[in-house]
Amino acid sequence: MATLHASPSADWTVNQVVARYPVTLPVLGRHGIDTCCGGLKSLRDVASAHGIQLDRLLDELDQVIDPREVVLDVRPDLRAGQDPLGKILAASESLKERQSLIILVGFEPVPLYNVLAGRGFSHLSERTIDGTWKVTFRRDETPRP
């Protein structure tokens, strides 16, 4: 599948990045990079001037432009007595080729494993310190018969 966006390169100016992808402003701001004084400088130059590894900056920008993870916290739905399955299935169907779906839930959602496995997903589950279950679903790489 072809990438639908052009990732910023080291030679793009800050203003080029922001003009094409306004969603990157918070990332640049966290690093003290602005569009005023640094706007005409390349990402390579501003990374160097701010002591940031260029690869790290480019990766952070790419992550907000084309996220690799979609996070869905279904705990509020469950607290409200709503079944989140429809929301989960819609999110899984809308994933791009390389994206993962992360579900946050208050219990281990064992039945969900089989539902999404039937749709071509594998999972990795972990329980966080606060008791939240974080389940990452990824499309299986192995084709099914």
Image (cartoon, rainbow, N blue to C red):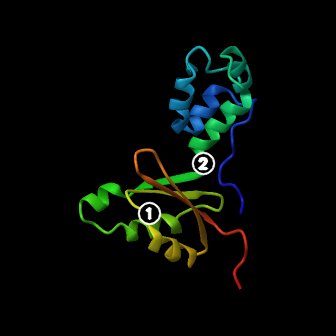
Pick the quarter of the image with the N terminus. Answer: bottom right
Amino acid type at circle 2 is: Asp
Q: Cβ–Cβ below 8 Å for labels 1 and 2?
A: no
The first of marks 1 and 2 along the sequence is 2
Amino acid type at circle 1 is: Glu
Q: Residue 108, which numbered label?
A: 1
Residue occupying image coordinates x 39% and y 71%: 86
Residue occupying image coordinates x 61% and y 68%: 122
The location of residue 13, given as percent across then percent down, is 68, 27
Disc 2: which residue: 66
Give the crowd class for mark 2: few <14, some 14-19, many >=20 residues within 10 Å.
some
Whether 119 is drawn above or below 3: the answer is below
The location of residue 40, given as percent across then percent down, is 66, 20
Secondary element type, mark 2: loop
Q: Residue 50, which numbered label?
A: none
Q: How many labels does the image show?
A: 2
Secondary element type, mark 1: loop
Q: Residue furthest left?
A: 80
Q: In this view, does 55 lie to the left or right of 60?
A: right
Pick the quarter of the image with the C terminus. Answer: bottom right
* 64 or 7: nearer the viewer: 64
Give the crowd class for mark 1: few <14, some 14-19, many >=20 residues within 10 Å.
some
Within the image, what quadrant is residue 100 found in? Answer: bottom right
Q: In this view, does 52 lie to the left or right of 83?
A: right
The location of residue 102, given as percent across then percent down, is 51, 56
The location of residue 47, given as percent across then percent down, is 69, 22
Residue occupying image coordinates x 59% and y 39%: 20
Residue occupying image coordinates x 69% and y 42%: 7
The span from disc 1 to disc 2 (Cα, nearest Å) is 29 Å
Whether 139 is drawn above or below 106: the answer is below
Whether 29 is drawn above or below 77: the answer is above
Q: Nearer the viewer, mark 1 or mark 2?
A: 1
